[in-house]
Image (cartoon, rainbow, N blue to C red):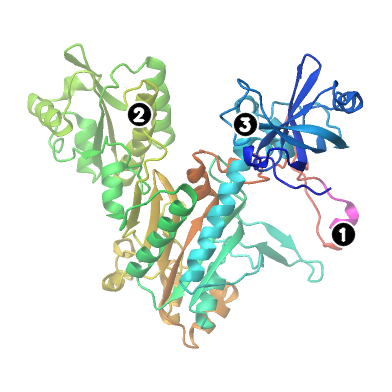
Amino acid sequence: MKRTHHCAQLTLAELNSSVSLLGWVDSIRDHGGILFIDLRDRKGITQVKFDPQVNAALAAQAATIKPESVIGVDGVIVARPDGTINKTLPTGAIEVDATALTIHNLSDTPPFPLDDIGGDKVNEDLRLTYRYLDLRRPKMRKNLQVRHRAAKSIRDYFDSQEFIEVETPALFKSTPEGAREYLVPSRIHPGEFYALSQSPQQFKQILMVAGVEKYFQIARCFRDEDLRSDRQMEFTQVDVEASFITREDVYRLFEGMIKKVWKDVLDIEIPAPFLRMPFVDAMNRYGVDKPDMRFGMELTDLSATFKESAFKVFQGTVASGGSIKAFNAKGLADLTQGELKALEDIAKSLGAKGLAFIKAEKGEWKSPIVKFFSDAEKAAITEQLAIEEGDMVFFAAAPWEKACAILGRIRLEAAQLLVKRGKMTIRADDWKFLWVIDFPLMSYDEERGGYAATHHPFTSPVPEDVEYLDSDPKRVRGQHYDLVLNGMELGGGSIRIHQPALQKKIFEEVLKIPADVVETRFGYMLKAFTYGAPPHGGIAFGLDRMVALLCGTTSIRDVIAFPKTQKGQDLMAQSPTPVTAKQLKELHIQTVIPEVKL
């Protein structure tokens, strides 16, 4: 089973050469008894001809083949006749006159078309059930190749920067203050459990204590989270940590990585340095800490305008310390009632009581709230929001962060409605990289009634803000940074705490984790810090999300060879599944199936 060439390699330069090819039957065409088979391998396609006038037995054997069967062909390269050249194929000027055929495996009829157009129309669950067929499609093969080239580019880049790749354990200890974990029962330690690693965070900091100085890893991580198009229960991240590094060093290092990956994979030059934006500015302008900057429609703060308003909803919000935010979706006044209702439902899901709006249509403002506005207020918002005929203005009145979040989401939805109408263009290849910086170190968790780390509890505070840790933790900025691209967080990281006393203070005094719990979960790390821990920091990039953007797809399932569904199932292998009573007994655990309420 030796091939002399791959199926995208043969040209007129090989005329009259004898060749051997291997691959899958892409298509079969019968032209008056002469069979033409497009033979496909991972590189491309070559046309093979079986002529019954030349070899009747061979042509009869070829007639038994079905598409997607695996065959081997020997033959001679000949030029295609005039008028039959396929200029869309590298091999389109030649064909192989078959002299021998080996059928390695006859295929059943596939359950869906294996071309990109037909396959894209198929229900994703069917594609995932037959993932081995889905991966034969040209688009899916290309996605896997892009992922390979991106991973290789990343490894080459960090090698050139003198980083070393170190593997860290997948089986770790449970740290339940983070995302929900996957627990793994221990057979030899009854009643005790490992947790699948959510990230190598603690290990990479320990590697800094160990003097590695420059570490990276393309790491497998696990989180028991609800799934969506850009989230999987098992995912891959580019994990990096370095000693004696500042935030400026991190920015330069990763801008260099991005430039190399985009050049190696897409042959695109990405300009650097990237724009930087403080968290507060991102929220004020775009309503989200990962803004899509490919279009405008920025939020405007109208709190001062409505501070003394007769409209009690707005005036009361300002008086209670909240904010009045608005943005102008220019040209969206033709919004249908159904579309407006859908936007209102989204706003309500984010905590709004409704969605106030103004339609500038047919020379007047149409809105239930306009009658409460004074002439001065109307003039002010006309100027501040540049309201013109055909515009649609949306408002939010709520505590600052909630008002930002509501309109941030509505802004994205409005943009898609404008794209649908042909009034806005948002290109997937308009690469708008942005560092979001100066996040608050702590966020107040209303449910817990206490503070929670905005990033993670190992993030170092900005030095000049440390004095506020006791009096006003929410005022403290963290040395945390996110790299955002087109509304998607590519990665995030921080400069870490390396002093054991400060780390212990954050755990026990700010986050209010009991001292015994701190010792159980992080005692080994605090002890390690007492033996000369260097200042260090790092970042983790989501490889799946990055490759999805490079491939121009919105779903990371399209760039993962064997993903799970949104219900966390592998439809191809049919997992998860029940296990035997013997297996459970060996692991010293019992299962409790929840009762189904009828």
Residue 297's x, y, as percent? 27, 34
The quarter holding residue 525 reads bottom right
Which mark is first along the chain, 3 or 1?
3
On the rendered structure, is 557 left or right of 550?
right
Q: CA distance from mark 3 to mark 2?
A: 46 Å
Q: Quadrant of the C terminus?
A: top right
Image mark for residue 92: 3
Q: Residue furthest top?
A: 362
Residue 196's x, y, as percent? 66, 61
Asked if one can make out residue 352 in the rendered structure from this viewpoint, the answer is: no
On the rendered structure, is 195 left or right of 578?
left
The quarter holding residue 421 reads top left
Camera-side residue of 397 and 479: 479
Q: Are marks 1 and 3 in contact (CB under 8 Å)?
A: no
Magenta stretch contains residue 487: no
Three-letter amino acid code of the residue under disc 1: Lys
Q: Is residue 386 above or below residue 204?
A: above
Q: CA distance from mark 1 to mark 3?
A: 62 Å
Name the residue: 62% across, 63% down: 197
Residue 188's x, y, as percent? 81, 71
Report the residue marked by disc 1. 585
The region drawn magenta spans 578-584
Q: Secondary structure at mark 3?
A: loop
Residue 513's x, y, as percent? 50, 68
Which mark is first along the chain, 2 or 3?
3
Magenta stretch contains residue 581: yes
Q: Is residue 589 above or below residue 468?
A: above
The quarter holding residue 328 reads top left
Three-letter amino acid code of the residue under disc 2: Ala
Which mark is first along the chain, 1 or 2?
2
Q: Secondary structure at mark 2?
A: helix
